[in-house]
Image: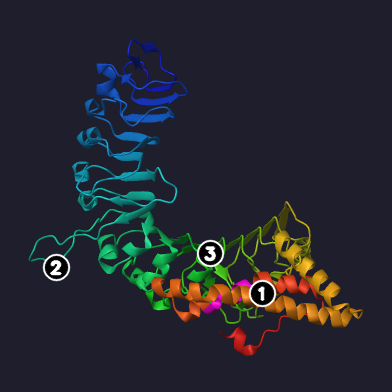
Amino acid sequence: MLLYSYVVDPISYGAGKILPEGCRWVSVHSNGNFRRILFDDLTHSKTRSLHFSANDLWQDSLLSLNHFKLLRVLDLEAVEFSYFPSEILHLVGLRYLALAIYKIPEDVPISNLWNLQTLVVSQSELDGRISLPIGIWGLSQLRHLHCTSMYVHSPRKVSVNEVNHPILEKLLSVSGLSLSCCTKEMFEGIKKVKKLGIFGTGNEFIDVPECLDNLIHLHELETLKIAGFNMDLLDFDFRLPRLVSFPPNLKKLTLSKTYLPWEDMTIISKLPKLEVLQLKNSAFVEAWSAERWEVTEMGFPELKFVLLEKLDLKYWRAADIDDNFPCLERVVIRNCSYLKQIPKVFADSGTLQRIELWGCSPSLVTFAKKIQENHEDLGNNMLKVYAFDTIGEVNSDEVNEEAAEGDMEKTVKSLEQETGLDSDEDSEDLAMKAVLDMLQSELDSDEEAADIDAEKAGQSSRGRDRSKAYVYKNYFAPLLVEFFPNFHLEETEEESSK
């Protein structure tokens, strides 16, 4: 008897396809066109694991899954369903279930799968969100729950007169949980979880800004990821939870598209057990000034690994304090094209072993190499610097907006022709004023409509001000510097503190 069968385009017999007999693990791969698959009785009784990777297996294909009484693993993630296949509910022995589905009705009795340990749900729509049935709280053996983006109903009370809620005692990892689900009741119901991924839209970050304070109820949480979706410049009001609200045993933190102010990094630096920090895709931004990460106090007592990826960070500095990054071993920087230097204190680090630079500027590579040389001069050959796909030097004031540049050039030339000024300086001053008026007019023309939309969305004036400043700093001001060398973007202390 075959233990494993890897089947590509099964042989056709009449109306269906027949697979080899009596295999314990069956994996079906096809590029053909078949809609009905026939399994022999021996396969029904022996198969424990069934995997489909067939891009033509439609949702109404007849799989006769209810005949696999002893099936433990069912992977249908490559097959898109518009509804939950009812025949799966008969597979009470399932330990692992993966499927792609458009919608699951709330009343689907998924708790019938009482042996289920891992549930993976992919969605047919990339920007969609799927609601899981309330019966999910009846899966007492569940250990892993993963989805791109999901809404989970809060657990209901055990009985009318009870105040307690059901608890998934064995659940260890959850990913794709909607930000709006981050309630006290939810986290108390999954209080044993060690890995958690939270996924939120811009509106959710505004509507439930303090929901992450409920993380305090996850005492055993070690890995946390927070990712934003459909975020824009108007969603700048989101802030990290208070330090006392962070899980006490958190070791790994990943932030992506959260648009946090860099001042919130102070909170992260004080997490006592944090070992891994990953900042990706505009996790932090600064609206009022050049983006900088300033480490002015001792912090990151246990941090060993740092990843910076696709950030507009221009300055990363750390005070010369012995207790800054005392355990850091590895730094990875990817596609941070504006960054020119890393903290000089790394030159005196006794723990740093590896610096990786991917798609970074030559200035940053040179600076990191000097740190390595400093280590070697001190007799420490442990630190290694690796650079991959180094890019050309990038001016932090450059803006790749050809259309905007073209419009500005036309404006300047037109003004020169109309005024007939011969003095370059006088001409530049007048042109600068005209362009500033033009840009201000553009801002003002949209401000009233933006205020109305923001008020409807419940956004504060602080968020709107930060958004406006960000647009000015990152788009308008660099254009002015490009065309008018005498123009300088002044940053006052008052602006910096906003």
Q: How is the image coloured?
A: rainbow
Instruction: Please name the residue that numbered disc 3 is placed on.
Output: 277
Marks 2 and 1 in Cβ contact (< 8 Å): no
| Residue plotted at (69% across, 79% down) | 437
The x, y position of residue 318, in whole percent, is 64, 77
Residue 242's quadrant in the figure? bottom left
| Residue plotted at (26% across, 25% down) | 64
| Position of 416 relative to 383 (above/below) | below
The residues bearing labels 1 and 3 have C-alpha atoms spaced at a distance of: 39 Å
Would residue 363 appear left or right of 13 to someone viewing this image?
right
Q: Work out whether mark 1 precedes mark 3 in sequence or the reverse, and give the earlier one.
A: 3
Q: Secondary structure at mark 1?
A: helix
- Nearer to us in this view, 143 or 287: 287
Which residue in the rendered view is the most extreme toward the front?
418
Instruction: Please name the residue that numbered disc 1 is placed on.
Output: 439
The x, y position of residue 498, in whole percent, is 56, 84
Which residue in the rendered view is the most extreme toward the left?
161
Asked if residue 467 lies in the magenta stretch, the reply is: yes
Q: Amino acid at mark 1?
A: Leu
| Position of 436 relative to 230 (above/below) | below
- Nearer to us in this view, 363 or 54: 54
Residue 163 circle label? 2
Residue 251 visible in the displayed image: yes
Residue 26 circle label? none
Numbered disc in front, either 3 or 2: 2
| Residue plotted at (62% across, 73% down) | 442
Q: Amino acid at mark 3?
A: Leu
| Residue plotted at (47% across, 73% down) | 271
Would residue 232 appear left or right of 6 to someone viewing this image?
right
Please report the bounds of the magenta region as a residue range.
Answer: 465-472
Asked if residue 37 lies in the magenta stretch, the reply is: no
